[in-house]
Image (spheres, rainbow, N blue to C red):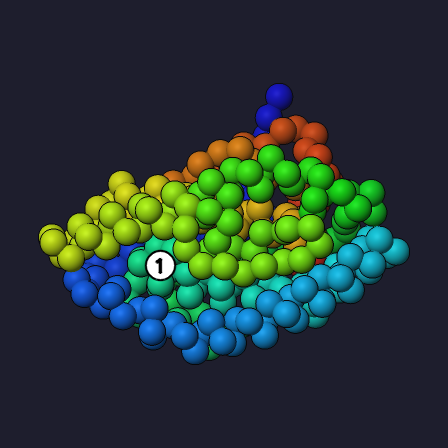
Amino acid sequence: MAVSVVYPVHVNAARDPRSSRWLWLVKWILVIPHYVVLVFLWLGFVLSSVVAFFAILFTRRYPRAIFNYNVGVLRWSWRVTYYAYGALGTDQYPPFTLAEVESYPAHLSVDYPARLSRGLVLVKWWLLAIPQYIIVGVFTGGGAWAINRSDNWQWNLGGGLVGFLVLIAAVVLAVTGAYPRPLYDLILGMNRWALRVAGYAALMTDVYPPFRMDLGGRDPVVTLPAVPPGPFVPPAADGTNEPV
């Protein structure tokens, strides 16, 4: 028996109706300032995740300030990836902020969990997530997203199936001036999968990421087991599960 819910990691994007044929050739230069900032942001992400690990282990709660920061780092990374060579989905330059920007076409939010499992926090980020890491590794070639290796989080660029498909999209865009919609939907689906795994591995949810390719820019309702590998706490009346 299964139940349909909205997965706690929400990834949405809107495709630019008109993309430049040639801007993608220089985006690697344009995003250098973002990459410099992200190096320091991800260093903070690693340190804050260690604090969150022990907080969950002893209190079953993810400290809200740390949660907001870590979600912001994922959000910032997703916007840069969407602009650059993880999707080439927009020519609108990413803002320098951890906060959600409604006017930007790439969005990410995570429902704040009221309680998290003490037991799962010990194993989900390495043991339980291994099958997901293998799939995401095929998609990204170990790049594009924070993938756990040993006990270090690493940020690399490009590669994998996503990088290959984005290259095809870039060539088609240069020749025709249009981004093929089926290709766009597939690339967004792979990025969404990777981000769900990143949120799970970063201890932000106990809900195991579904083995399902949800295509396109709009985050759909997903089907999960009736008894998932961790407690899924529905949104509470007091707003403890509002997305950030």
Image quadrant where residue 185 sits? top left
Residue found farthest to the left = 176
Q: In the rendered view of the protein, which quadrant contains the C terminus? A: bottom right
Examine the rendered structure and indicate whether residue 243 appears above or below residue 126: below
Q: In this view, does 225 lie to the left or right of 11?
A: right
- Crowd rating for badge 1 (residues with CA inside 10 Å; few <14, some 14–19, many 20+): many
Examine the rendered structure and indicate whether residue 162 appears above or below residue 48: above
Residue placed most toward the observer, 165 or 48: 165
Q: Position of residue 90 (x, y in %)?
A: 30, 62
Q: Where is residue 122 in the image (x, y as percent from the top left)?
A: 79, 46
Residue placed most toward the observer, 176 or 110: 176
Residue placed most toward the observer, 22 or 90: 22
Q: In the rendered view of the protein, which quadrant contains the N terminus? A: top right
Examine the rendered structure and indicate whether residue 10 appears above or below residue 55: above
Q: Position of residue 12 (x, y in %)?
A: 43, 53
Residue shown at the point (58%, 52%) measured from the top left = 147
Residue placed most toward the observer, 92 or 31: 31
Residue shown at the point (83%, 59%) measured from the top left = 54
Q: Mark 1 points at which residue?
A: 85
SS at mark 1? Answer: loop
Could you tell me if residue 87 is visible in this image? yes
Tell me the kind of residue under disc 1: Tyr
Residue found farthest to the right = 58
Residue shown at the point (84%, 53%) measured from the top left = 57
